Amino acid sequence: MDIKLTPAERLILANQYEILGELRSDDYAKRLAENLRNGYEFLYRDVFESVSPEMDETSTKFVLDTLIMYQAIENSWEDLGKPGEIKAIDVEFPGFDGNNEGRFYGFACALADDNRFTAQLGLRGKNSHSPKASTYRRMLAVWKELADQYALTKDQIQLVLAARGY
């Protein structure tokens, strides 16, 4: 990873590492602060290798749209009195696959940690243990075509759920 920091950014990070080094009596953090101040990129660039790239807007929107869709499905199902033709497990968000959809899963977990979409994600997020993104894209395509996406009829819920393909 090629990181180019401005002198101001290096100084800010150096100060933070110096404080961290003092608080924790951590010689590595103190050395890192010195290397940042002196501009020894070779000696500090590996710190940035553990930083993931920012999640793109398309992926962010996909995860949020999926959770909003499941929220609408579940709320509508409950508002309809939980019709027996639709099972509770069908309206529950299955999650993203932690192995194959790691960015989606990680973002969903971060949302859960931030107390968002807790009805869909629980306290830590849900791992589907199988890829689900293509299924959610099919469901979203159907859901987005509905006139009122947030007050679904029983037939509309079944229509969206049928897009799962199973």
Image (tube, rainbow, N blue to C red):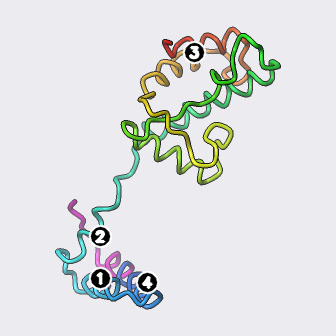
Q: Secondary structure at mark 2?
A: helix
Q: Counting residues from the N terminus, which is met first, the one under dot 1 or under dot 3?
A: 1
Amino acid type at image mark 1: Leu
Q: Position of residue 132 (x, y in %)?
A: 45, 27
Q: Counting residues from the N terminus, which is met first, the one under dot 2 or under dot 4?
A: 4
The answer to whether the residue labelled 4 contacts the one labelled 1, judged by CB atoms less than 8 Å apart, is no
**Mark 4 burial class by Cα count in 10 Å: few <14, some 14-19, many 20+:** some
- Determine which residue is flagged by label 1: 32
Seen as rendered, the residue at the extreme front is 129
Q: Counting residues from the N terminus, which is met first, the one under dot 4 or under dot 1?
A: 4
The answer to whether the residue labelled 1 contacts the one labelled 3, judged by CB atoms less than 8 Å apart, is no
Specify the segment rendered in magenta: 1-12
Amino acid type at image mark 3: Glu
> In which image quadrant can residue 1 be found?
bottom left
Task: Give the Cα separation between the discs numbered 1 and 2.
Answer: 9 Å
Q: Counting residues from the N terminus, which is met first, the one under dot 2 or under dot 3?
A: 2
- Determine which residue is flagged by label 2: 47
Task: Give the Cα separation between the discs numbered 4 and 1.
Answer: 10 Å
Q: Which label is found at residue 145?
A: 3
Task: Give the Cα separation between the discs numbered 1 and 3.
Answer: 54 Å
Q: Position of residue 45 (x, y in %)?
A: 23, 70
Left or right position of 78 against 116: right
Task: Give the Cα separation between the discs numbered 3 and 4.
Answer: 52 Å
The answer to whether the residue labelled 2 contacts the one labelled 4, judged by CB atoms less than 8 Å apart, is no
- Tag nearer the camera, 1 or 3: 1
Left or right position of 19 against 88: left
Q: Secondary structure at mark 3?
A: loop
- Tag nearer the camera, 2 or 3: 2
Amino acid type at image mark 4: Leu
- Determine which residue is flagged by label 4: 20
> In which image quadrant can residue 102 be found?
top left
